[in-house]
Image: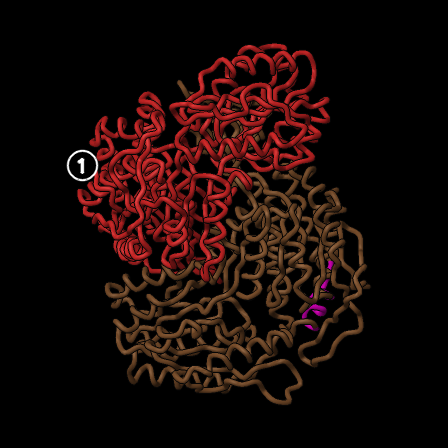
Chain colours: A red, B brown
């Protein structure tokens, strides 16, 4: 496949900017030959204007029409063939098995949303019939308009150009302008080609999708500041997400930013769990911390234990396993330097001790960081919020608490997270209930006797959480409810049946589940 | 009833501040004797800290327990008796009939939420069963934590200390700290007494509710900046709402602000509607513009017509009726001066002509402004966004469009609104569909052959809309869905049945509707 290094603005390639950057193979620290052009302000303007024009058309599309488009995208991604996997592997070093799975997840997301749309209940139709002194009122969900999506580095498929944010925004019926991640520009261009093909095959207006490349922060800032953007989806670092959030809040007309910014994902292990299955937990924890070289927003970065011999021996075991595991490939130099900086900052706290790792590996041929285990006290972490920063890589920090009260006080001091986890035994249930529900206040997902990595794309998934995990704790970026970030309810009062959307007509021609006078029914009125 | 002029901090009266202000009777421009004490920063801190402590307890409460509390609040409001009506009438000049209706709406809101909670489906339980390679995941809605509520001036009951925002936050299971509106401090204190009595009667922790008085902006700024506040509800002016939004966005840990900031509520009247029933529409429009002296966020402030004799005569008729109607009482001096300023600013545009009114009434014994009708062209309003500002009072602006295309172009240039309205006839349906759905993009509620004032408190109501109508167009501040502003989903992965909330247990002991493996059911698993 011949790539161009250009931006895709409403179906046309465009390379007006002088700034270029390159794809780098993290396994060899070698850059590829093709220059990629960062978008200009004019290209951003054109992409958003085209999205606005496209919205005037696609806001009339039925759920069935949108579903066909989503299925087409999945098929077009598959049609890219294994060249996509090879390309992404060269740009990210994530390996073919992982990327093969991630591709299936990515196409699966589009098809899952297509099914949701065909089934139709997602429109959340609510009807109150006319009554004495009260007109008929009927509401349902509608797309908000042009959406800006920021791709992540660590999921080149599932959270990138055609990732879950894009899938849910397109499923909602919104045009999408994606800011691609500079860590994998060639992969991004392949996805842009698949989207372009799907747009053409389904007769969507060209402005329904644009993809902008950019090495720095300018393209993103222009995009978020554009007055025609109605909502923003972002997956990435706290620093990046906060900058986008601040830019959107500063607009004359602010818009919501759904930023998912990662987490330390606290894991509490009870004495009972350690007594019963320390080996299994150690193995699972090390696998979870090192999976994908630790580059997951659900990486278990903070492990809370109660002091004692069992904890001591567990920590030693995890340390040994982490030390023995090979240092994985990091995605790119920015990630490697960021990790070095974050661990370095943490290590400046005198109450932190390094049990293994803690430094970059000198003279390595590939981007990497030593598998790292650190240890501190509960009092230390309560005294310094900075110890709760995310170390985006194969790093975990043990927090050794004096006793159950010390642990509870520490959980109370935790910031917001995507997940929190408890390992405990059946005979501890009575004591553990309070702790579990204390942990729920700190996260969007609470895991029992498992590990936070691995996020199922299902209706009940909640991938979100209080700040700094996200900027919108009431929403999720994974699972079917992700669509509601890009929809809003509109009510029709006294509107004649002929002018109502099908979902709200008396006859319920879509046959969807509706709340009619406070009762759920899929029947006609 | 003996009022104190104090703040109510977690059940105790407190008046540590030196700044005081007074209740003013708008019908006489006379201030009452009792000084009200603006809260101090320390009082704000205490109120929020107590709310945080209360949340540790009430987050364990069942829906049934919360429902009993809401019913108790309704009963305690009723127990205030007609002294409440007299007090509010003295402070707002709204009149006893209106206030009697508003009280019923206010107690009705609490009881409607109580019913919602008892019925239980609002928890939005979603369950995905364990499957090969996928753990059990179950999610439901939980309260977010302490909420700050800003009371409005124009609804001393329904959008104030115990208004819809407070009702929905308490229904969600959140403690509430209300910043009372300085326009009706005595009424606010009466509600605080009712809330305090309900808290005590139901054994709620004292910190579940606090009410802070404040003449200026300091109390609100301290409140929103407090790190333990998790969400903010606001009803009031664009300027006030934006200041609160900005303050929350600047926090180290930003939180969502649900600000409802009013609107111009465009009304389109087709030639067919004018031909068929100009008199009725004129009468309805004047009633809607002057109702409550025009002090409604749904006041129809912008009326779009196509030029012609019928329009000319309709405008003359409305002008005559507006001119003949008595000038109503405005809530307070701030509202009166604000209205004078807003109309004055609009009149500086040379393309605006005044058909009647346009000025304050000299030497009036009461706060008022002349009923005002203005007129401009479609081109003028498209050329100057400032003509879309809200004139909060008995004021409307006719926009005379050259033809249907000119009208469509003008609708396209409209900012976000709470409502948009079309008056049209049955034989125009085919032409009007596009316009109706163009208007839907500009509002949260679309009204057919009616007027925007009058907001039914029902499940299908959407009282929201794109900025500047609100800061969160995906949410509503009226109707049952208002509760979701103060809840967030939390998922439980692989958690034993004994530790799950009742709503998520296998047996479905609450008997609520749940989405189980993508199918809605109220059965057990």
Near-viewer residue (A127 or A329): A329
Q: In the image, what residue occupies the spot 28% across and 56% down?
A: A46
In magenta segment, residue A297: no
Q: Is residue A311 above or below residue B351?
A: above
Q: Provide the residue designation for mark 1.
A: A2
Near-viewer residue (A335 or A412): A335
B333 lies left or right of B454: right
Tell me residue B306's x, y (percent). Answer: 30, 77
Near-viewer residue (A70 or A122): A70
The picture quadrant where one finds residue A120 is top left
Q: Main secondary structure of the magenta part?
A: helix
Tell me residue B270's x, y (percent). Answer: 31, 73
Tell me residue B236's x, y (percent). Answer: 57, 64
Q: In the image, what residue occupies the spot 49% across and 26% down?
A: A360
One can see residue B123 in this view = no
B425 lies left or right of B459: left
Near-viewer residue (B171 or B74): B171
Tell me residue B82's x, y (percent). Answer: 71, 65
Categorize mark 1 by other alpha carbons within 10 Å: few (<14), some (14-19), many (20+). few
In magenta segment, residue B87: yes
One can see residue B419 in this view = yes
Q: In the image, what residue occupies the spot 41% across and 35% down?
A: A479
| Residue stretch in magenta | B80-90
Host chain of mark 1 = A
């Amino acid at each position: 496949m011949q790539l161009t290094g250009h931006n895709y603005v409403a179906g046309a390639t465009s390379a007006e900017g002088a700034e270029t950057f390159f794809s780098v193979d993290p396994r060899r620290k070698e850059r590829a030959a093709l220059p990629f052009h960062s978008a200009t302000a004019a290209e951003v303007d054109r992409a958003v204007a085209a999205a606005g024009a496209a919205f005037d058309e696609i806001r009339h599309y039925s759920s069935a029409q949108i579903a066909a488009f989503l299925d087409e995208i999945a098929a077009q991604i598959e049609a890219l063939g294994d060249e996509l996997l090879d390309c992404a592997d060269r740009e990210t070093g994530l390996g073919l098995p992982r990327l093969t799975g991630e591709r299936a997840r990515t196409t699966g997301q589009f098809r899952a949303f297509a099914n949701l749309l065909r089934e139709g209940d997602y429109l959340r139709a609510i009807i109150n019939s006319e009554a004495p002194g009260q007109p008929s009122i009927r509401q349902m969900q509608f797309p908000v308009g042009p959406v800006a999506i920021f791709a992540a580095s660590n999921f080149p498929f599932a959270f990138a150009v055609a990732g879950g944010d894009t899938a849910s925004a397109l499923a909602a019926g919104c045009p999408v302008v994606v800011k691609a991640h500079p860590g994998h520009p060639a992969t991004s261009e392949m996805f842009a080609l698949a989207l372009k093909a799907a747009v053409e095959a389904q007769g969507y207006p060209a402005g329904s999708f644009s993809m902008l490349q950019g090495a720095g922060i300018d393209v993103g800032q222009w995009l978020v500041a554009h007055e025609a953007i109605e909502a923003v989806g972002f997956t990435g670092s706290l620093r990046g997400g906060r900058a986008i959030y601040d830019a959107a809040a500063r607009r004359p007309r602010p818009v919501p930013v759904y930023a998912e910014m990662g987490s330390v994902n606290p894991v509490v292990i009870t004495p009972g769990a350690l007594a019963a299955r320390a080996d299994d937990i150690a193995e699972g924890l090390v696998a979870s911390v090192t999976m994908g070289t630790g580059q997951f927003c659900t990486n278990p970065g903070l492990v809370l234990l109660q002091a004692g011999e069992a904890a001591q021996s567990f920590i030693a075991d995890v340390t040994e396993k982490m030390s023995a595991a090979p240092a994985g490939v990091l995605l790119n130099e920015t990630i490697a330097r960021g990790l070095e900086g974050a661990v370095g900052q943490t290590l400046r706290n005198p109450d932190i001790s390094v049990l293994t790792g803690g430094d970059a590996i000198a003279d390595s041929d590939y981007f990497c960081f030593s598998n790292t285990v650190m240890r501190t006290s509960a009092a230390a972490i309560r005294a310094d919020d900075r110890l709760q920063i995310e170390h985006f890589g194969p790093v975990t920090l043990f927090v050794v608490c004096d006793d159950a009260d010390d642990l509870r006080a520490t959980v109370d001091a935790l910031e917001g997270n995507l997940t929190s986890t408890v390992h405990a035994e059946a005979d501890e249930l009575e004591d553990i209930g309070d702790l579990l529900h204390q942990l729920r206040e700190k996260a969007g997902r609470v895991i029992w006797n498992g590990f936070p990595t691995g996020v199922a794309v299902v209706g009940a998934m909640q991938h979100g959480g209080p700040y700094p995990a996200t900027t919108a704790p009431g929403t999720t970026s994974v699972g079917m409810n992700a669509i509601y970030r890009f929809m809003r309810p509109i009510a029709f009062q006294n509107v004649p049946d002929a002018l109502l959307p099908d979902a709200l007509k008396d006859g319920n021609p879509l046959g969807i589940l509706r709340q009619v006078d406070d009762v759920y029914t899929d029947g006609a009125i």
